[in-house]
Image (cartoon, grey):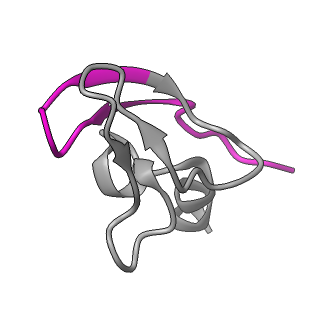
Amino acid sequence: MMGSFVKESIITCPECGHKELEKMPTDNCQWFYECKSCGVIIKPKPGDCCVFCSYGSVDCPSIQLKKDN
């Protein structure tokens, strides 16, 4: 049974600072994200599993669920 987790995160572009509320995928990690303001392709920082863990206001669902265990 899956625990509860936050499904949305505010992702902040490291290039222009634009913030966008995005729904996070629950079945995989998202490795790339295109900023809706400047168009740069964002990739996770070394050691992070996805762009939400690197640039989001909330860790991705898989990390949230691991912390619950």
Q: Quadrant of residue 24?
A: top right
Residue 12, position as x, y percentages in the image: 24, 35
Task: Looking at this view, name the residue that lies furthest to the left.
Answer: 16
Residue drawn at x 62%, y 55% as measured from the top left: 29
The residue at 39%/79% (across/down) is 47
Residue extent of the magenta highlight:
1-21
Within the magenta stretch, is there residue 19? yes
Viewport quadrant of the C terminus? bottom right
Q: Nearer the viewer, residue 4 or 22?
A: 22
How far across and down, in percent of the image, does residue 38 sit?
24, 27
| Residue at 31% over, 39% down | 40
Give the residue at the far front of this rendering. Answer: 39
Given residues 53 and 51, the one toward you in this image is 51
Q: Is residue 68 above or below residue 60?
A: below
Q: Which residue is rendered at x = 87% and y = 50% of the image? A: 1
Q: Would residue 50 be counted in the magenta stretch?
A: no
Q: Position of residue 18 (x, y in %)?
A: 19, 25
Q: Is residue 8 above or below residue 55?
A: above
Judged by its main secondary structure, the magenta piece is loop
Q: Residue furthest right?
A: 1
Is 15 displayed left or right of 22 in the figure?
Answer: left
Q: Position of residue 34 (x, y in %)?
A: 43, 35
> Vertical placement of 5 versus 42: above or below?
above
Counting labels gives 0
Position of residue 22 relative to residue 48, above or below, is above
Along the line of sight, the residue nearer the viewer: 35 or 49: 35
In the orientation shown, which residue stands out farthest toward the bottom? 47
- Quick check: 1 left or right of 19? right
